[in-house]
């Protein structure tokens, strides 16, 4: 094992795959000469050259469309958005072309493409740069959606995403790029659609993903001191969803809290709630609790932002609510 930053795990995944397959290339704003806006492509221009690590104009719709056309012609592009907030400019290309082309062409065209970049809040970036779109893209048939929470998962999942023959939305976080974690020395893959039980417990299941899962870990540590054992499931992939892992855990703990960095209406937590109540209703000893951001655009004020985001105290309160029904 070796210790790397999240950004280094991303760069390793892309570089290893590009060495393996010459049809893979990276394109996006500042990915080449600047080594990436978050240094997640550091050194790649020097190794692979300007034909495979391509700086683009500030035109997400344009370079996303170029990448989709390239994928239709046998290449495997990786498209970096400086933030997924900017992917809204390209959302027509992603949803109406990338996601649908395989079906609309009667299977004549696969779209092996990865759209990657940061999602969610990253501090004081205000309303238009602090949004989570996992549920938006997961709502679209034809897209796979991945949101890793640590360097090991990020590398293994990104390599699998690059090898996938369908379009994958791969969502990271500005606030995780500097996170350090151990990863295996050699090559490894993590399959898409498989959740991971990060901590085992018997009293309550907490389901989360992405950087907000750190708040679940903090809450679990605090609750353990009070004799409460939390089982924490990291979804890793939003679509396809690993419902089996969630259901099996709920059947053991009989209680469920879902923590997600997204607005409360029509989100990933809502979908999980429906499936658990459909498949494991008789096992629930308390109503499911879901924790989301406040139902407003993200504030700029750090004081308001702290109130807007769910935190470990919210998780502790939710766990006690399902345990003690108060």
Image (spheres, rainbow, N blue to C red):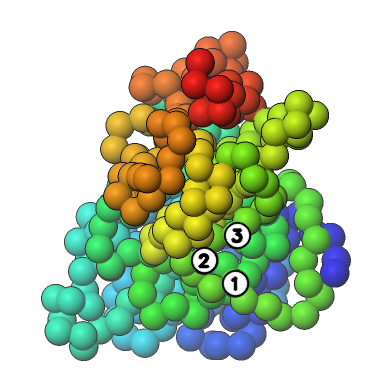
**Which comes before the other along the chain, label 3 or label 1?**
1
Q: Using the image as rendered, state which of residue 129 and residue 203 is in the foreground.
A: 203
Quarter assignment of residue 223: top right
The residue wearing badge 2 is 194
The residue wearing badge 1 is 190
Which element type, helix, strand or loop, lies under badge 1? Answer: loop
**Residue drawn at (85%, 66%), measured in percent from left and top?**
2
**Mark 1 vs 2: CB contact within 8 A:** yes
**Residue drawn at (68%, 78%), measured in percent from left and top?**
188
Name above or below for residue 24 compared with residue 153. below
**Mark 3 vs 2: CB contact within 8 A:** yes
- Nearer to us of marks 1 and 2 is 2
The residue wearing badge 3 is 196
Name above or below for residue 127 compared with residue 204. above
Distance between the alpha carbons at the discs numbered 1 and 2:
8 Å
Q: Using the image as rendered, state which of residue 319 and residue 114 is in the foreground.
A: 319
Residue 187 left/right relative to 296: right
Q: Using the image as rendered, state which of residue 26 and residue 107 is in the foreground.
A: 107
Mark 1 is surrounded, within 10 Å at the Cα level, by few (under 14), some (14 to 19) or many (20 or more) other residues, namely some
Q: Position of residue 57 (x, y in %)?
A: 42, 55
């Amino acid at each position: 094992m070796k210790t790397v930053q999240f950004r280094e795990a991303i760069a390793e995944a892309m570089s290893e795959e590009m060495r393996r397959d010459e049809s893979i290339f990276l394109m996006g704003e500042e990915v080449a000469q600047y080594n990436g806006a978050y240094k997640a492509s550091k050194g790649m221009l020097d190794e692979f050259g300007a034909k495979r690590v391509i700086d683009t104009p500030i035109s997400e719709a344009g370079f996303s469309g170029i990448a989709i056309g390239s994928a239709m012609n046998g290449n495997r592009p990786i498209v970096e958005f400086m933030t997924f907030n900017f992917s809204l400019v390209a959302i027509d290309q992603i949803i109406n072309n990338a996601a649908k082309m395989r079906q609309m062409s009667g299977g004549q065209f696969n779209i092996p493409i990865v759209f990657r970049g940061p999602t969610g809040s990253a501090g004081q970036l205000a309303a238009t740069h602090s949004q989570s779109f996992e549920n938006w893209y997961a709502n679209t048939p034809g897209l796979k959606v991945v949101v890793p929470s640590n360097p090991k998962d990020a590398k293994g999942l990104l390599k699998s995403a690059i090898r996938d023959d369908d379009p994958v939305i791969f969502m990271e976080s500005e606030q995780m790029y500097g996170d350090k974690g151990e990863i295996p020395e050699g090559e490894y893959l993590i399959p898409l659609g498989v959740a991971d039980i990060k901590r085992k417990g018997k009293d309550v299941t907490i389901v989360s993903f992405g950087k907000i899962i750190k708040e679940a870990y903090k809450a679990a540590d605090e609750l353990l001191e009070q004799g409460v054992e939390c089982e924490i499931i990291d979804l890793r992939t939003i679509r396809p969803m690993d419902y089996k892992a969630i259901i099996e855990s709920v059947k053991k703990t009989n209680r469920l809290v879902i923590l997600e960095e997204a607005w409360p209406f029509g989100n990933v937590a809502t979908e999980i709630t429906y499936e658990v109540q459909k498949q494991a209703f008789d096992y629930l000893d308390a109503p499911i609790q879901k924790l989301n951001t406040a139902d407003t655009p993200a504030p700029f004020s750090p004081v308001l932002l702290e109130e807007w985001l769910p935190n470990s105290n919210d998780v502790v309160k939710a766990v006690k609510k399902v345990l003690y029904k108060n």
